[in-house]
Image (tube, rainbow, N blue to C red):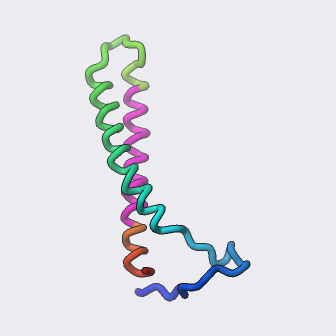
Amino acid sequence: MPATTPRRWRSGTEPATARSDLKLRYLLALTFTPLFALATAGFAFWAANAPAFGAPSRGTLTGFAVACGLLTLFAVVDLVIVVRRRRTEL
């Protein structure tokens, strides 16, 4: 279904008609998706090779790997949404 949003300058009714900057969201998602993926792999590798009673514990490193993995997932989902919206709106 094609978008029917008019392409015009915004008026004073921002909450009702506000639109996000798709170019900026695309750039940020494109930048941070591989960064978070590399951080996930790095923390997972570090956790797998950490000593049993090391100074950051395996649990802490695993937690960081999971958090970075979730951030990677959110960035990928946002990238897919932005690409789909750019195709229909621009």
Give how far across and how far down residue 3 sits, in percent.
46, 85
Does residue 34 appear left or right of residue 71 in this picture?
Answer: left
Instruction: From the viewer's side, name the closer residue of 47 and 85.
Output: 85
- Residue projecting furthest to the top: 53
- The span shown in magenta is 61-80
Where residue 13 appears, as percent x and y from the top left, is 71, 78
Q: Residue at x 42, y 67 (%)?
A: 82
Q: Image point 47% across, 68% down: which residue?
A: 22
Residue 20 drawn above or below residue 88: above
Residue depicted at x 67% and y 77%: 16
Q: Position of residue 64 (x, y in %)?
A: 42, 33
Q: Is residue 28 left or right of residue 50?
A: right
Q: Quadrant of residue 50?
A: top left
Question: At which x and y percent is residue 85?
Answer: 42, 74
* Residue 63 colored in magenta in the image: yes
Q: Which quadrant is the N terminus positioned in?
A: bottom left
Residue 87, compared with residue 6, is above or below; it is: above
Residue 57 highlighted magenta (yes or no):
no
* Residue situated in front as seen by the camera: 21 or 16: 21
